[in-house]
Amino acid sequence: MNEKQIQMLMQNLDNDLLAKELDDLTSDLEVDLDSITQKAFNKLNQERLKKKRKRFYPLVAACLITVIGISNAYAAEISDFVRSFFNQRAIYSTVIDGSAYYLESPLQLDKEVKLENVIFTKDKLDMNLTFSLIEDKLPEILVATANGKIYKPGGYGYDNDRLLLSFWNEVEHNYMFSPTEELKLIIGEKSYSIHLTEGVPVVGSGEINPAEKTNIDWVKVGYKKIDQGVQILTSFTDNDLKLVAIGEPDQNTVTRIFKNENGITSSGTSSMTKPLLGYGKDKNVYTYNQAKDAVGRPVTQFETQDPADTEIELKIPSLLVGYEKDFGNIDVAIPELNEEKRIDREIDLKLQKITLQSIKRTSATTAELKFALNTGDKAEVAVREVSLYSKDVQSGDSVWQGDVCTMGISFDGKLKNAQLNLSWPRFEVKGNWTLKIK
C-alpha cells in the first residue's frame, strides 16, 4: 500500500477514530508526535493549501506514517474498516455493491406515463411507473440497453397508483445484468430514452464512523450522517452474503408456501423489522424508523427527530442476511401410512447448519418433515428461513420458529420418492452493535 492509498483511506475515517488509531500504533515508538504533526501542518501551509486545520488531519496522519516508518501491516490495520466499503454506492434509500445507476429525479415521459425511479445494478433492474391505462390490460413493457440486451418484467406489483416492476433476462433465464447509463423503455408501441446517473461512492463522500467493536469479526458495521438521521453501512467478509434488512425481526415465526398448480407459485413472510432505538446522553430514548417513502431494498437510511446537539448510542440488535443461491437437493423416501422414518441428514448452509431429522406419513396423500435448526457452531447466527421446494409434490408449507422447522407436503398417493431443493437461506445475526452518533 503506497502513501497515496493510505491518505485516501484515512480521509474517510472520522477524526476521533483516527486519533485513537494513531495513539495505539505509536504507543511503543519513541517519537515526538506533537512535533511531527506540527511540522506536517507547517509544510501543508507552505504549499498554500488554504483549508481548515480539521480537514488536514487525515493528510497529517499520512505524513506521520511516512515519517516514522509504520509498516504496511499497521497501515492495513487502520484502513481495513474503510476498505471494506470501497465497492459500495449509495442510491436512494439503500446501498449497492458494485456498479449501479439510478434515475436522479422523476421523469414525465408523456401525458400518461411518469417514470418515478429506476435502480440498475449487476443483479437488479427495478423501476416504478405511474400512468393511466386506456384499457384494463397492461401493455407490453420492455427495456433495451445499448449492448443489445432486452429485458422483460419478471414480476410486478402495485403500491397505490404506482406500478412496481422487476425485470429479468428472459433469454438467459437469470437476473444477471450489465448496468449502463443509457437505456430505452418500451411501453406498447411507444419508446422513451432514459439517462441514468451513477451512484455516489460511499468512500470519499463523507466520514464513515464505525460501530463499537464486537466479537463478530466477519461483519463490519458503520454509519454516515444524513439530513434526518443516519445511513447504516454493512460489509461481510463472505462476498456472497447479502444484507436483507437492518434490525430485529418484527415476527418470530416465518411461514413459506408453494404450489405446483399451473406453474410454480410461492409466498412467504415479509422481512419487516422493528424500529431501532437510540439512547441519548440527555436520558431520552429516540426512535429511528426506516426512511419515509424509501426507494430501494434493503433500506439502510433511518430517520429520527433527535436533537442535533445530543450524543446518542444507537442500538442495532440484529441484521437479517442471506444467500441468493441454490444449496442442492435431498432425496426423500416417502414412508408407508403412519410410518415415521429417521433421516438425520445434516445440511450445511455456510453461515449455519440445519438437520433433516425425520419424515412421517400422516395420510394417504400427506407427510410431515421435521428439521432441527441452528446445529452449527455459530451461536450468534439463527436460521430464519430456507426456500424448500419439490417438483414431485403438489404443494408444501413450512413453518420456521426458534430451533425447529415443520414442513407439510401433499402428493399423489402413489409417490414413492421426492426430491427436495433448498435455496435462498436467510439468517438473523445477533450482533448487538452500537453506533455512537455525535
Image (cartoon, rainbow, N blue to C red):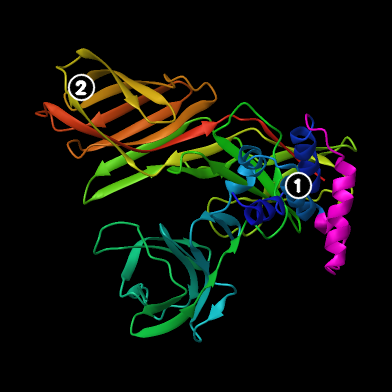
Position in image of residue 172 (x %, y %): 25, 60
Main SS of residues in magenta? helix
Disc number for residue 295: none
Residue under pointer 1: 67
* Closer to viewer: mark 1 or mark 2: 1
Q: Which percent across, then down, holds residue 3?
A: 66, 53
Tag of residue 363: 2
Kind of residue sitting beneath label 1:
Val
Above/below status of 190 relative to 210: below
400 lies above or below 20: above
Q: Secondary structure at mark 2?
A: strand
Q: Is residue 48 magenta?
A: yes
Q: Amino acid at mark 2?
A: Ser
Residue bounds of the magenta highlight: 28-56
Q: CA distance from mark 1 to mark 2?
A: 78 Å
Q: Residue at x 88, y 37 (%)?
A: 281
For the point 35% across and 43% down, the residue is: 325
Of residues 345 and 130, which is closer to you in this image? 345
